Amino acid sequence: MLASGTWGLGENLNKFLTPKEIRENIGALVSKGISINPKEGNPPPRLFETPSGLINSIGLENPGIKEFKKTYLPKLKSYKVPIIVNLHGEKIEDFIELAEELKEEKIAGLELNISCPNVKKGGLAFSSDPKTVLELVKEMRKIWGNFLAVKLSPMGPVYEIAKICEKAEADAIVVANTYPALAVLNIKPLKILQGGLSGPAIKPLTLRLVYEISKKIKIPVIGCGGIISGKDALEYLLCGAKAFQIGTANLIDPRSALKIIKELKDLKNGLCS
Ligand SMILES: Cc1cc2nc3c(=O)[nH]c(=O)nc-3n(C[C@H](O)[C@H](O)[C@H](O)COP(=O)(O)O)c2cc1C
């Protein structure tokens, strides 16, 4: 799957990949995070490249659910590949409203981003509060019968949250989102950028989470963190992931997914070591 936020909303996808390549290689397209109202996101700079990773501070920019449904979703559906819509909200009711908006749409499922702040809990991330996550997933399950995945933050009570997602009958969990990080942009005057770290730097950290979590729960774990080669993907599969998502690699080369899938197939056929 192509991970949320790393290939936009498909505006430029067909400049790099043909519909046939997408259909034959990509298991699902996971949309950029969608909220009820449009969000402008953070002012630039929003990206900072570290030696082996990327810090992003996009601020969840998106066109809002109405515009997403009207302008972007029809085009995404035309690729004839499963579409998973990534959602974020400021409170549980927002997630419910977003799911209601998508009920009639032919999409493969939803992915809930619980790394976002919960205004009802003073801005603490949903992912830091197991009780809220339990309520969120239970409430979503009442109205959403289709595929429902929860995308975990790698921070906070991760194992407890994973178990709670299973208890609340989520179909899968995605492990994981980015890690809080900071870059110094200028020394004098000091200028910093705070955001989420992704890419190869986080692979060993997330790989361990996938390994440990998949021993503790029975629902599928989708691995996501620093996959840029077929070997990376294979390692996730060997460590318990049932599927994987490719994120930052898309920003390095929008055709990365094809290369990764080819390498994975070659490894499976014993052509690489
Ligand atoms: C530029 C950028 C934007 C992202 N936007 C979202 C988002 O809207 N929602 C979300 O759940 N994750 C978002 N992510 C996190 C990725 O989907 C992925 O979980 C993370 O980058 C780790 O995978 P990677 O190391 O392969 O990139 C974003 C990541 C990047 C780099």
Image (cartoon, rainbow, N blue to C red):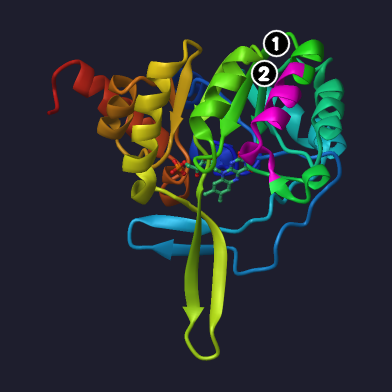
Q: Is residue 132 magenta?
A: yes
N-terminal of the two: label 1 or label 2? 2
Apparent side of residue 256 relative to residue 189 in the rendered image (left or right): left
Apparent side of residue 22 relative to residue 81 in the rendered image (left or right): left
> Do residues under tags 1 and 2 come within 8 Å of each other at their CB atoms?
yes
Mark 1–mark 2 distance (CA, rounded to whole Å): 6 Å
Residue 212, x across and y down, in percent: 37, 26
Local crowd size for mark 2, using a 10 Å CA cut-off: few (<14), some (14–19), many (≥20)? many
Q: Splitting the image into 4 quarters, where does residue 136 fall? A: top right
Residue lying at 35% horizontally and 26% vertically, measured from the top left = 211
The stretch in magenta equals 125-138
Residue lying at 43% horizontally and 20% vertically, measured from the top left = 243
* Amino acid type, mark 1: Asn
Q: Splitting the image into 4 quarters, where does residue 236 fall? A: top left
Which disc number belongs to residue 109? 2
Q: Does the beta carbon at disc 1 come under 8 Å from ligand 1?
A: no
Which disc number belongs to residue 197? none
* Amino acid type, mark 2: Gly
Residue lying at 82% horizontally and 13% vertically, measured from the top left = 143
Of residues 185 and 156, the one nearer the viewer is 156
Whether 168 is drawn above or below 122: the answer is above
Whether 258 is drawn above or below 49: the answer is above
Residue lying at 33% horizontally and 32% vertically, measured from the top left = 260
**Which residue is labeled 1 in the image?**
146
Q: Splitting the image into 4 quarters, where does residue 230 fall? A: top left
